[in-house]
Image (tube, rainbow, N blue to C red):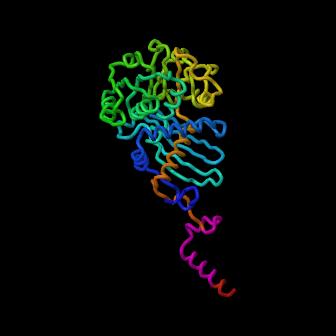
Amino acid sequence: MPNTFTDRSTTLFLSPQDVARLVGQQGISATLKGLASYITQDFLRWTAFDKSARLAAHSPDGVIELMPIADADSYTFKYVNGHPKNTARGLSTVMAFGVLADVATGLPLMISELTLTTAMRTAATSAVAARALARPDSRIMALIGNGAQSEFQALAFHHLLGIEEIRLYDIDARATAKLLGNLRNNPDCANLRLVVCESIRGAVRGADIITTVTADKTNATIITADMLEPGMHINGVGGDCPGKTEIHADVLRAARVFVEYEPQTRVEGDLQHMPADFSVTELWQVLSKQQPGRESDTQITMFDSVGFAMEDFSALRYVHDLAQAMHLGAGIALIPQLNDPKDLYQLIRPKTVALRASSEETVEAEMA
């Protein structure tokens, strides 16, 4: 297929099926590792990005967001929603697509699905943070919330961090059954123990890492301070918009808290519980060794993850590179092709006018 960086006639389009084929060809473990590598690379050049918090349109039932970011060469944005009631309508809670464009020209190089890709990049980001913040000997994780994101979190922590046992809890037993069905008898999880728990407290007792990935748009308290044990790492994923939290404020007070982009997390994360002077550390500072991560085996750490545009930038770069290497996707004529770039009207010029103009040009050429 044409190289979309040089061919200006089409924009590369990746459907959900294309991304699924991409994962199928190289395997979920390799895909998660590749995403984690690209995300880490971009965190390490954090200052190269033109960053802003995402734009959000809130409604009683959910939120629709636009997440833009750019470096000197590429611009990306993601359109994404979050509507917890959607499953009752046969729709996904989260749906997304994204665009990768060339900064020098503004040319859209690729449009890609980002629903599946977002789930994978979120899990990969969780693993990148946990590698820096969790105890290196962590082997047991509690996974609270077993919905659409849960399999990806389980696989990322199993393959990228060596988690051997995952305790599962969800208020909806069908969600847990779904997760079990997807992961049991899966060759990617041959050495992963899955334990169904009857309560959150039972799931987190003795766990090294706690991942919360619930969906309700409410100020919930999934994890409270009396559940904490020395050395735990909390991966808070579900609290990601104003009025939607999972972690009690006392947990944040007891932990050292890390975030992606502080201005955004202050508004959207569990950090919205806390006063403006509550101290946090941005993850890029830890990865670049400008700030320490975990400081002792007994310290409690928390990654207040809301999802940031840079992670989608990394994911779009990654799927674009792989799609080109694997010859996946299709070209679509998104941008008009013009003989004269100053004459946009030519696209709708009546044919009779166009024919007359062409004939006059031919006569003038012959007379010359």
Say left or right for 207 vs 309. left
Q: Position of residue 208 (x, y in %)?
A: 45, 20
Would you identify the image quadrant in which residue 88 lies? top left
From the viewer's perspective, is residue 111 above or below residue 169? below
Closest to the observer: 284 or 254? 284
Q: Position of residue 181 (x, y in %)?
A: 30, 34
Asked if residue 349 is among those painted magenta in the image, a careful observer would answer yes
How many numbered marks are there?
Answer: 0
View extreme (bottom): residue: 367
From the viewer's perspective, is residue 123 above or below residue 291? below
Query: Residue at point 58% right, 18% down?
Result: 295
Q: Which residues are magenta?
A: 339-362
Q: Position of residue 10 (x, y in %)?
A: 53, 59
View extreme (top): residue: 226
Q: Quadrant of the C terminus?
A: bottom right
Say left or right for 192 vs 79. left
Closest to the observer: 22 or 111? 22
From the viewer's perspective, is residue 362 above or below residue 85? below
Main secondary structure type of the part rendered in magenta: helix
Q: Position of residue 108 (x, y in %)?
A: 57, 53
Asked if residue 310 is among those painted magenta in the image, a careful observer would answer no
